[in-house]
Image (spheres, rainbow, N blue to C red):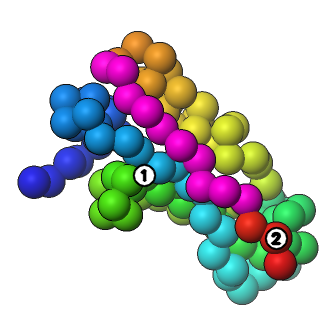
């Protein structure tokens, strides 16, 4: 089975009755070049490092269903989900149980 869009993932989860897990995962990257206009958007306030963040959706067994393109980390997970229209898809689509991953502390 190949799910090509976030809308297809939401439809699949609703049709199968499977729970979904959503997480914005920070991936460390090298600092962007000096003089780049958006250089500060890559700084993660959470980990105090330069990073990008993709939004990932898995089923309750941990199978990857969808991964967004990586974006700079200067926004919260909920903001990222709104920008990807995930919140709207969940509100307007089939009944889907979605859980965020538990926050981890280092």
> First in sequence: mark 2 or mark 1?
1
Q: Quick check: is 102 in the magenta stretch?
A: yes
Point 20% across, 48% down: residue: 3
Point 63% across, 43% down: residue: 80
Q: Quadrant of the N terminus?
A: bottom left
Look at mark 2 in the image and give the residue it sits on. Answer: 105
**x and y percentages locating residue 72 in the rendered image:** 68, 60
Q: Nearer the viewer, mark 2 or mark 1?
A: 2
Magenta-tinted stretch: 94-103
**x and y percentages locating residue 86 in the rendered image:** 48, 33
User: In front here: 69 or 64?
Assistant: 64
Look at mark 1 in the image and give the residue it sits on. Answer: 57
| Residue 96 at least partly seen | yes
58 lies left or right of 70 = left
89 lies left or right of 36 = left
User: In front here: 43 or 100?
Assistant: 100
Q: Quadrant of the C terminus?
A: bottom right
SS label for mark 1: strand
Point 42% across, 24% down: residue: 89
13 lies left or right of 55 = left
Point 68% across, 81% down: residue: 29
Q: Residue furthest bottom?
A: 30
- Predominant SS along the magenta part: loop
Marking on residue 41:
none
Q: Residue furthest top?
A: 92
User: In front here: 23 or 40?
Assistant: 23
Q: Residues within 10 Å of mark 1 (few under 14, many from 20)?
A: many
Q: Is residue 58 above or below residue 97?
A: below
Q: Residues within 10 Å of mark 2 (few under 14, many from 20)?
A: few
């Amino acid at each position: 089975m190949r799910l090509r869009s976030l809308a297809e993932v939401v439809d699949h989860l609703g049709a199968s009755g499977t729970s979904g897990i959503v997480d914005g995962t920070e991936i460390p990257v090298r600092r962007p070049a000096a003089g780049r206009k958006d250089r500060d958007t890559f700084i993660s306030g959470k980990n105090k490092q330069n990073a990008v963040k993709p939004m990932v959706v898995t089923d309750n067994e941990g199978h990857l269903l969808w991964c967004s393109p990586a974006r700079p980390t200067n926004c919260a997970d909920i903001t990222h989900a709104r920008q990807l229209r995930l919140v709207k898809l969940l509100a307007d689509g089939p009944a889907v149980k979605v859980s965020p991953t538990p926050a981890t502390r280092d």
